[in-house]
Image (cartoon, grey):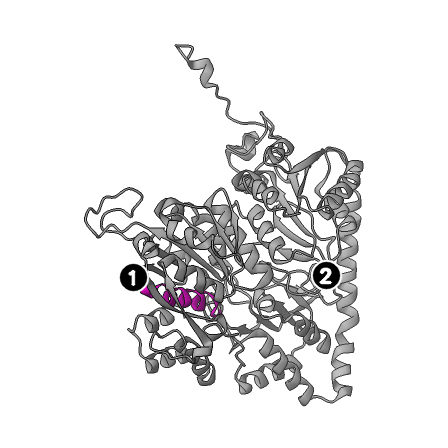
Amino acid sequence: MRSIITGYFNNTISRRGFVKNMLASGFTLKSADSIIKSLENLKEENILNESEYRTVTGTGGDLLVQQIKDAGVKYVFTNTGSYEVGFFDALVKEPNIQLILGLHEGIVISMADGYHRITKEPAFANVHVIAGTAQMAGQLYNAHKDYSSLIVSAGLLDNEIFSDDIFLGPSPGFDQKEINRQFTKISWEVKNAESIPVMTRRGFKVAMTQPGGPVYLAYSNYALEAENVKGDIVSGENFMIPSKINGAPELIEKMAKMLIEAKNPIIIFGDEVWKSDAQDKAVELAELLSLPSVPARESFRNFPTHHPLCIGSYSPGMTFIGNNVDLLITFGAKDFGRDRVTSVENMPELVKCGINTSDIGRNYPFNLAVVGSVKEILIDLIDCIKGMLTEERLKSIKDSRYSDIAEYTKNSRSRFLDRAKNNFNKSPIHPDRLGYEMNRMLDKNAVIVSENFGGSYDFFNFGLRESETMWMFNTGFSLGWGVGAAIGAKLGEPNRQVVLSIGDGSVMYSASGFWTQARYGIPIINIVWNNKNYQTVRNSFNRYSGNMAETGHYAGIYLGDPDIDFVKLAESQGVEGEKVTSPNEIEPALKRGIQKTKDGKPYLIDVLVARTGGGAESTWYQKFDLAEKRIKKV
């Protein structure tokens, strides 16, 4: 879909060709027509009524600021640079847009990413020219993996005016947008001041067209600084429209029949449930026929994790309650398969539903694919099932499964609690005790922004509704995301408790974000799971069963000697905090953190937790002391 949209914007694909390509990708004719009508709003020749736009005359920077304002931007996430002066000079005149300063480009992008994930609105970021553009790559990768709608702007020093070897410019023969092309839907360079409004609108539109994703626009310094430039500024409602696309009725009817006839179906709900506000409908479908349901391990938990029909997880070939799964339906979830070749031999009948055709049939063949918005598909599917069955038949199917599934999930959670309770009084603090206390003390509708791969979270009832705890994660796994994402989430949901749950290794990729929390009064509870270890990597090394597992000498894993004082690290940037070293200290520390955030201040709790898994006892690292090797004491 990305290449089709790119071709249409670049005029290498005609309107007819666009529709033909969309049909080949699985969209219906009605859906393709709907999408192309929204894209046509971006054509420069598109004429609006005078009430739908306003004309601005000023610098190129003025045009950019006014266009993002009319696109609905409230915050600009940025790390400033000299060659974006035209933009920032215009920004100081616009009181309705708040600048949020991050001290590294990675923080900037993760703040924008967290803001988008919590609000579903486009997020606008600005980074420095080529060096700043390169430094944001790890967090742009995370946003790209989860289809986050970010508009990333940057300054540009043009290497095609005279010298091609210039300070802070692209290397000779290259352009700046090539740096991050694979992590964006499309990247552009803007060198004509008059084109700033339309190209900016185009960026917003492409970023928000489903499936979403980051776009990148590099604005030349001379375009931003140009004076007496006239441009038309258009309201966001005239170039961004909601993507509500219905699935083909005949395919939904076929899916309904498959569900009714299946003996042992399983449903998987992915992040398109979050994107389309569809969790209520996901629950309604599950309860209609007592369907065992799985929240896919993606950015959010898209089905309530403590619901009696939530069975936890699914893997190809698994059995459920002693029976082979005969039908698997996924709603807006990524396809199975990672870095290993797996067989399709034991796969049940597979139905894939969603808007992102690149995730449908990517690794596994399907029996049926329904392309459309997940919420619209669920609404139509529920109506179709109700229209096919009498109330008595619906009740019969529901009752035949419910008690067995509910008993299974009840026993699974009971076994987890029994195992966890055995760890509650251990010292150092076991992750199970910290997870238990967090669930007990925090608001039930808190937002947990997690960048901690070794935490214990099964105590929480994660979901997307107001009464449920929201889990926010990323599937790119590029470290340095959590601190910034929590800032963006709190800016997007200021009246909801936001908790950053982060590993000690992850903190050191993004610790400068504590300064941003303090400067702008962003009251986040920061909980550091401090085990002095890259535990996820150590467990991977241990599974390899090589020299490291045999000797207990794990290369580059232990983070002690010297120990990092996260409280002092946060306090140096204006965030108060405390250390927790025993289980009975967790509750009072959380109470102080909660009160501090109620008072409008961020707070950090550094919790010393036990390492778990193979090699947990190892504190080995390769010793080296340069000072001892000196010949001259300087």
Query: Looking at the rendered structure, which numbered label has been put on residue 192?
Result: 1
- What residue is at 60 percent from the left and 54 percent from the top? 491
Q: Position of residue 327 (x, y in %)?
A: 61, 74
User: Can residue 215 be seen by looking at this rendering?
Assistant: no
Pick the quarter of the image with the C terminus.
top left
Residue 304 is one of the magenta-drawn residues: no
Compared across the picture, whether 521 is left or right of 245 comes to: right
Residue 607 or residue 323, whichever sits in front = 607
Q: Give the percent coordinates (x, y) of residue 592.
A: 76, 41
Secondary element at image label 1:
loop
Q: Main secondary structure of the magenta part?
A: helix
Could you tell me which secondary element the residue under label 2 belongs to? Answer: loop
The N terminus is located in which quarter? Answer: bottom left
Name the image quarter holding residue 153.
bottom left
> Counting residues from the N terminus, which is met first, the one under dot 2 or under dot 1?
1
Q: Is residue 123 visible?
A: yes
Amino acid type indicated by mark 2: Glu
